[in-house]
Image (cartoon, rainbow, N blue to C red):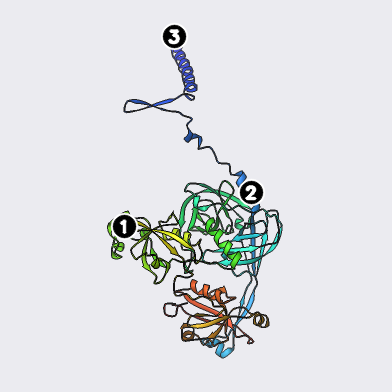
Amino acid sequence: MKKNILPVVLTAVVTSVLTLLGFNYFTEKPVFSFTNGKPQVQYVANSSMAGTQPVDFAPAAESAVKSVVHIKTLTQGKTVIANDPYDPWSQFFGPRRYNIPGQMGSGSGVIVSSDGYIVTNNHVVAGADEVQVTFNTRNQQIAKVIGTDPSTDLAVLKIDGKDLPYMTVGNSDQVQLGQWVLAVGYPLNLDATVTAGIVSAKSRSIGINRNNNSAVESFIQTDAAVNPGNSGGALVNTNGQLIGINAAIASPTGSYAGYSYAIPSNLVQKVVNDLIKFGDVKRGFIGVQLLNLNELDKTAASKLGISEEDFNNTTGVYVNEVTEKGGAEKAGIRKGDFITAINGMNVNSTPALMEQLARFHPGDKVTISYSRVGKVRDAIVELKAAPGGIAAVDAKGTLQLMGATFRNLSASESGKYKISGAMVTATGNGILARNTPIRPGFVISRLNGNDINKVSDLQDALLQASGERIEIGGMYPGKSGMYYYGFPYDDAGDGL
């Protein structure tokens, strides 16, 4: 029996030794594979494997949390009196009283300058009576709202200070799919929190601003964990640079269970600069109506006159209509063209195109590349202040809206009556006169939940409400009580 076992043991020992020697040898030597009978040399320790080393997020995370702040908002409770002439209760029993309780909210913000400018989301601070900023060091300040832009869901705050830890803004155009990113904010009222993920898509539109007729949605989509409270926080690359402002999540539960969406930093930078310099955003338009080919099938495309060849092979955004006397018409762009690039940046969807244009001001000239019958052309287009049909506030602050004429309140009127808003100077014959008993002198201070402080606020709110129902709140200076009116809004006949 022993004679039978001994050869087996010796064979096992020799095999083990040879295996170990072979492993040590080949881990530092070429490994051979064969293609068509010829040996092909590949080194195990090649550059592609070296690139799989773990990414160190620590430096970016450490610097980012110093620049991201916790924002808490307070909206005071109030009592409003409604004396609606169409309400039977008010007619028989007097004006109704409504008690609106106070509300508290929270979100995040990013310090973008050493002297205390902070960017956050509009929805974080909308309607707030007080905005409190807390640093990760526990220091607190009351912030002033410098300006808001519902179209991009951005807002700018200001706190006192100097040499504050601010975040450097990166170039969101250079963000790539699969790139590692960090989301930094104050979710669920926790302290500063950092999560990691990758960029899973760009130029995403999810319809979160669908009630805003001039919304600009071209989000960076990531799978970094984001929850309520992260809004207004930073999306950061591994160099610690700001590449986006976190704004939304797509989730079946309302908390993190899907994807998060951030506003690209290049768009953020333009909006922030405008809000600081002008108090609102100056936006330019080329004067076209667009269609995404990826939202059409072949049948729908054929009905629009798009050939099957163009549908299958052409990239870009289809020009469905051209506004008369707009910049595009003057530059020679026609219905049926496909816009493929703005200033050399390729655009394959409406959100991508809108993001590029939203970075410019009225009067700026941009190079638009477009395809017509398979031939690519370039045109210099001067951006206009509005897409057409929208009036501008004149030097006296008056404006025609809904068929009526409005003006800004003077400082003395606002101080005397303790009210801000847009005053009706003439009711005209439009939808306001047709649907309400409002008379000249009425001051609109609320529209669809938006505070109206001046005529331009009313214009912006009406742009958001296009095709929706209008809910107006206001008063007659010197009279007690608030008046509320509601009616369907279709701006096709009256214009803005």
Residue 133, position in %: x, y?
67, 61
Image position of 438 with respect to 374: above or below? below
Question: Would you identify the image quadrant in which residue 42 lies?
Answer: top left
In the displayed orientation, state which residue is furthest to the bottom: 92
Task: Give the residue pinned by disc 1.
Answer: 311
The answer to whether residue 474 is left or right of residue 208 is right
**Pointer 2 or 1: first along the chain:** 2
Question: Label for residue 5?
Answer: none
**Quadrant housing the N terminus:** top left
Task: Give the residue pinned by disc 3.
Answer: 3
Label 1 or label 3, whichever lies nearer to me, is 1
Residue 223, position in %: x, y?
50, 51
Cα–Cα span, label 2 and label 1 = 47 Å
Please state which amino acid type lies under the numbered disc 2. Answer: Ser
Q: Residue at x 52, y 53 (%)?
A: 172
Kindly check if marks 1 and 3 are in contact, taking CB atoms under 8 A apart as contact: no
User: Tag 2's secondary structure?
Assistant: helix
Residue 286 shows in this picture: yes
* Residue 306 vs residue 66, the one in the foreground: 306
In the displayed orientation, state which residue is furthest to the top: 3
Cα–Cα span, label 1 and label 3 = 81 Å
User: Tag 3's secondary structure?
Assistant: helix
* Residue 309 vs residue 299, the one in the foreground: 309
**Pointer 1 or 3: first along the chain:** 3
Please state which amino acid type lies under the numbered disc 1. Answer: Phe
Crowdedness of circle 1 by 10 Å Cα count: few (<14), some, many (20+)? some
Crowdedness of circle 3 by 10 Å Cα count: few (<14), some, many (20+)? few
Task: Give the residue pinned by disc 2.
Answer: 63
Residue 125 shows in this picture: no
Q: Residue at x 58, y 41 (%)?
A: 56
Please state which amino acid type lies under the numbered disc 3. Answer: Lys
